[in-house]
Image (cartoon, grey):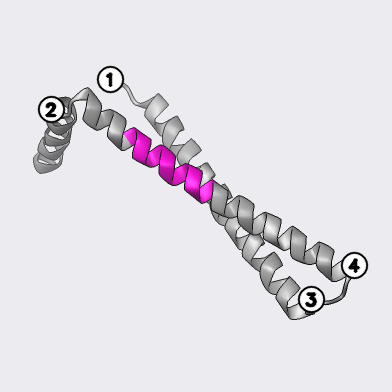
Amino acid sequence: MIEAISSIQNISMVSESMNIDQKEHVSSNFLQLMQSSLETVNSDLKASDDIMQRYMVDKNVSTHELMIAMEQAKHSLQVSVQVRNKLVEAYKQVLQMQI
């Protein structure tokens, strides 16, 4: 128990020793990671929609290809929703912390 408390104190010392530039760098990296992930999800959804439209109009797209694209878009969206849920849950836990 005491070791756990001392490790928490060590984390707070590391956080305090970080300067503002380092903290901004960490937050900008996180922001860039989230933006690139959302762009990937968006491109998967657009690709699925494009393939579906080509399938309905031209029938030059195989049903197999259509289903794969739709499942990939569905999976990407589900993962992004779960990440969002975890982030919201973590934010709520931080808000409930007593200082």
* Camera-side mark, 1 or 2: 2
Disc 1 packing (10 Å; few <14; some 14–19; many ≥20): few
> What's the residue type where badge 2 is placed?
Ser
The residue singled out by tag 1 in the image is 99
Find out whether the residues at labels 1 and 2 contact each other: C-beta distance under 8 Å: no
Q: CA distance from mark 1 to mark 4?
A: 61 Å
Q: Earlier in the sequence, mark 3 or mark 1?
A: 3
Q: CA distance from mark 3 to mark 1?
A: 59 Å
Crowdedness near tag 4: few (<14), some (14–19) or many (≥20) residues, C-alpha within 10 Å: few
The tag earlier along the polypeptide, 2 or 3, is 2
Residue 10 x/y as whole percent: 11, 35
Give the number of the disc on residue 57: 4
Label 2 Cα neighbours within 10 Å, binned few <14 / some 14-19 / many ≥20:
few
Residue at left offset 76%, top offset 66%: 51
Quick check: marks 3 and 4 in contact, CB under 8 Å?
no
For residue 17, the mark is 2
Q: Say whether disc 1 or disc 4 marks the residue closer to the N-terminus.
A: 4
By secondary structure, the bulk of the magenta-drawn segment is best described as helix
Q: Give the magenta part as a residue range.
A: 27-38
**Three-letter amino acid code of the residue under disc 1:** Ile
